[in-house]
Amino acid sequence: MCAKNKKAESSSMEDKMKGLILAVALLLAVRALALAQDAGQRYRGEGYVFIGDGLYPEYPGHLGIGHVGGGGEVNLAKGFSVGSELCAIGRPGNGAGLFSIDASYRLLSSSSKSKLVPFVDAGYTRSFDNYAFIRDNLFNFGGGIHYWPFKRVGLRLDFRDYVNHSPYVTSHFPALRIGLAVR
């Protein structure tokens, strides 16, 4: 009976991971269509996908955790932008989905000629459908750098720390991520 439950949970998690991958692909497809229609104007935002690794310090030895997902941002004014992100964090069959809404600041504007654009960001994160992690409201903060070797396609390297603050303990889930960005 126990093996059946674990198999059902694993199958359910696989279905949800497939849904996450489909949602990220759909987000990027919509973004690509928007870029194709508005090729002559200043960059109004970007989409990105990433993969990374992080730490889960609740267990001795700081067990490494996988991190994969994607998101998008809309530029507002003078380097400020808002965005959202959907990702999975953890090991297959033993992790959590995370949805974040963030504000970020680019130290160089999107119209700058520089190929390196550093940024900082912070915001709200909600975890969901998890077995080994917390199911709670979190906040996140981080920063990184975009490298734009091409006009509309670039690399993104960033650090993100998800923080769960409760009355009893504060837990951190830091991750280093690398990804592909399009604008």
Image (cartoon, grey):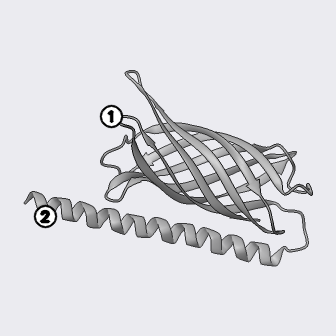
Res 133 quadrant in image: top left
Q: Position of residue 101 (x, y in %)?
A: 61, 47
What is the three-letter code of the residue carrying label 1? Pro
Q: Which mark is residue 109?
A: none
Q: Position of residue 91 (x, y in %)?
A: 37, 55
Q: Which mark is residue 60?
A: 1
Q: Which residue is mark 2?
A: 4
Name which residue lies at 76% across and 48% down.
81
Q: CA distance from mark 1 to mark 2?
A: 29 Å
Name which residue lies at 32% across and 34% down.
60
User: From what the image shows, is residue 4 above or below residue 104?
Assistant: below
Give the secondary structure at mark 2: helix
Q: Position of residue 39 (x, y in %)?
A: 86, 74
Instruction: Choose between 84 and 61: the one closer to the eye.
Output: 61
**Furthest-top residue in this view:** 167
Res 170 quadrant in image: top left
How many numbered tags mark residues here? Answer: 2
Label 2: few (<14), some (14–19) or many (≥20) C-alpha neighbours in 10 Å: few
Name which residue lies at 80% across and 69% down.
152
Name which residue lies at 47% across and 65% down.
20
Quarter of the image that includes the C terminus: bottom right
Q: Answer with mark 1 or mark 2, whichever residue precedes in sequence.
A: 2
What is the three-letter code of the residue carrying label 2? Lys
Quarter of the image that includes the N terminus: bottom left
User: From what the image shows, is residue 102 above or below residue 94?
Assistant: above
Instruction: Choose between 16 and 151: the one closer to the eye.
Output: 151
| Closer mark to the observer between disc 1 and disc 2 | 1
User: From what the image shows, is residue 69 above or below residue 174?
Assistant: below
Give the secondary structure at mark 1: loop
Instruction: Choose between 127 and 161: the one closer to the eye.
Output: 161
